[in-house]
């Protein structure tokens, strides 16, 4: 898990992050100053799982100690060079979290005379820099965007963004961007910058007046804010001396099914926090490794499509195309007419005549909701996917599948009870036969 750090008073540029952390942790003899250089040699031959670190800063204070390291790591047949920051054993920042710097022969860390921190390879090639020449300390302001790392195996990454009216979490996929959590000050007030204090995340207006706060629930002072690489959850973390580790004092999302990728694409998060695939193919293929099973994509090349409706299913993804005061049939048609539309979420409230249609280009973030809430999710599938003779009971069949483990448990209980009744009746008959 890679963590993105917000110190108590300052953040980026990275040079000043180092200086502030050194001040906060009571360490002033790191030897890192203008003109400083540190070089690490790269192995001549590739060694799988190789990882080497040279620590240039390390505090001698009580736990958790603060460390900065120049790191060489073997990744996909090449060597990557990065600068890493640790609090205790937790890596809270990595210069290569968004883009790797691959090198040969050597990796050089340099702090230039005008205040720019750089990673360089052979022939003076610069692979990463802070861009802080002659700049001063900055706080996190509007338009700041912190991102999780993007692994080679996933096209998704998460971001924490400060906007004019809110702070929000986003799921990013190529050019697509969906929000899944947000926090807004009351009275529609605008945010100028935010700061992490020892007791919470503080939001300020243009007059530097505090307008809102996301409070910490713990008794220990906060150390950093983190965005989890794997789940996309936002947390405010403190250090627990009793347990000797960092723990979350606050988490934006506390339910598994509220996470954007709690299940794979075309998967549904059920009430038991388990996942189940939407399996509605006419052939025997019951879904692939990504749950799509051939359902997704290809509708912009002339392939005909139809919509498959699933009741009591919603999506945690927001920030999508929204149309109001239309019928479910019209909502369905809007998605069918757009070849890039993958699904539509329809919400209808008969008592208030409220009707909303949301159009998605990803089938992701699905979760089961209570009956009677008015949500209906429609997935675009190739025409003829569902067998015509099954069309009348497709909806019921899908909902059973959506139950996943829940349905399996019920079936096992009912089946077990039925088996017990049969055995008991058989035993009673034999007993009566023995007494006559």
Image (cartoon, rainbow, N blue to C red):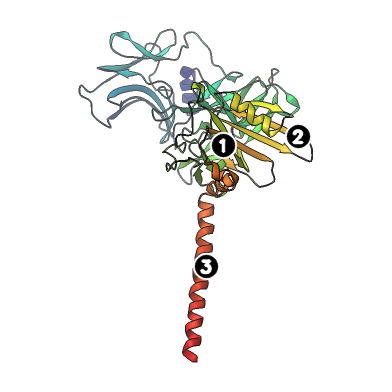
Q: CA distance from mark 2 to mark 1?
A: 45 Å
Q: Earlier in the sequence, mark 1 or mark 3?
A: 1
Mark 2 vs mark 1: which is more N-terminal?
A: 1
Label 2 Cα neighbours within 10 Å, binned few <14 / some 14-19 / many ≥20: few
Q: Secondary structure at mark 2?
A: strand
Residue named by callout 2:
354
The N terminus lies in quadrant: top left
Between 227 and 374, the one nearer to me in the picture: 374
Q: Quadrant of residue 181?
A: top right
Tell me what residue is drawn at x 28 percent, y 8 percent. Answer: 123
Cβ–Cβ under 8 Å for marks 2 and 1: no
Q: What residue sits right under mark 1 in the picture?
A: 221
Mark toward the viewer: 2 or 1: 2
How far apart marks 1 and 3 lie (CA) works out to 57 Å
Task: Tell me the quarter of the picture where residue 154 sits.
Answer: top left
The structure residue drawn at horizontal position 47% and vertical position 12%, both measured from the top left corner, is: 132
Q: Which residue is mark 3?
A: 418
Give 261 or 63, whichever is nearer the viewer: 261
Q: Does residue 435 sit above or below 191 in this rendering?
A: below
Say if 306 sits above or below 256 in the image.
Answer: above
In the picture, the disc for residue 40 is none
Q: Position of residue 269 (x, y in %)?
A: 54, 43
Residue lying at the far front in this picture: please name it.
389
Residue 216 visible in the current orientation:
no
Residue 301 placement (x, y as % from top left):
49, 21
Label whose residue precedes the other's in the sequence (3 or 2): 2
Horizontal and vertical percent position of residue 17? 49, 21
């Amino acid at each position: 898990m890679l963590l993105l750090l917000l110190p108590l008073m300052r953040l980026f540029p990275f040079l000043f992050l180092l200086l502030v952390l050194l001040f906060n942790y009571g360490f002033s003899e790191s030897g890192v100053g203008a003109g400083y250089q540190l070089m690490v040699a790269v192995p001549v031959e590739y060694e799988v799982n190789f990882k080497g670190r040279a620590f240039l800063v390390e505090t001698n204070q009580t736990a958790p100690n603060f460390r900065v390291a120049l790191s060489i790591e073997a990744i996909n047949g090449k060597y990557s060079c990065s600068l890493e920051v640790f609090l205790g054993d937790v890596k809270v920042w990595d210069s290569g979290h968004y883009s790797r710097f691959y090198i040969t022969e050597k990796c050089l860390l340099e702090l230039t005379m005008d205040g720019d921190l750089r990673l360089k390879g052979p022939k003076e090639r610069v692979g990463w820099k802070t861009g802080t020449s002659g700049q001063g300390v900055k706080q996190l302001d509007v338009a700041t965007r912190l991102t999780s790392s993007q692994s080679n195996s996933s096209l998704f990454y998460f971001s924490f963004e400060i906007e004019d009216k809110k702070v929000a979490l986003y799921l990013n996929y190529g050019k697509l961007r969906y929000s899944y959590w947000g926090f807004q000050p009351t009275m529609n007030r605008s945010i100028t910058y935010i700061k992490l204090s020892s007791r919470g995340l503080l939001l300020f207006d243009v007059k530097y007046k505090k307008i809102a706060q996301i409070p910490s629930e713990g008794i220990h002072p906060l150390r950093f804010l983190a965005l989890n690489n794997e789940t996309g959850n936002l947390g405010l973390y403190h250090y627990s001396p009793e347990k000797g580790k960092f723990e979350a004092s606050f988490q934006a999302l506390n339910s598994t099914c509220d996470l954007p990728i709690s299940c794979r694409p075309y998967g549904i998060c059920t009430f038991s926090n388990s996942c189940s695939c939407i399996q509605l193919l006419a052939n025997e293929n019951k879904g692939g490794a990504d749950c799509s099973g051939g359902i997704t994509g290809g509708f912009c090349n002339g392939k005909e499509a139809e919509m498959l409706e699933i009741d009591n299913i919603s999506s945690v993804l927001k920030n999508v195309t929204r149309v109001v005061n239309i019928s479910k049939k019209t909502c369905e048609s809007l998605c069918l007419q757009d070849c890039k539309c993958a699904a539509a979420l329809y919400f209808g409230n008969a008592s208030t005549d409220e009707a909303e249609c949301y159009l998605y280009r990803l089938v992701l973030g699905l979760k089961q909701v209570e009956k009677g809430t008015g949500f209906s999710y429609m997935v675009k599938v190739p025409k003829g996917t569902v067998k015509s003779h099954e069309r009348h009971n497709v909806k019921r069949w899908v909902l059973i599948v959506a139950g996943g483990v829940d349905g399996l448990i019920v079936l096992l209980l009912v089946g077990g009870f039925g088996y017990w009744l049969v055995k008991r009746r058989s035993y009673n008959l034999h007993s009566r036969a023995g007494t006559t």
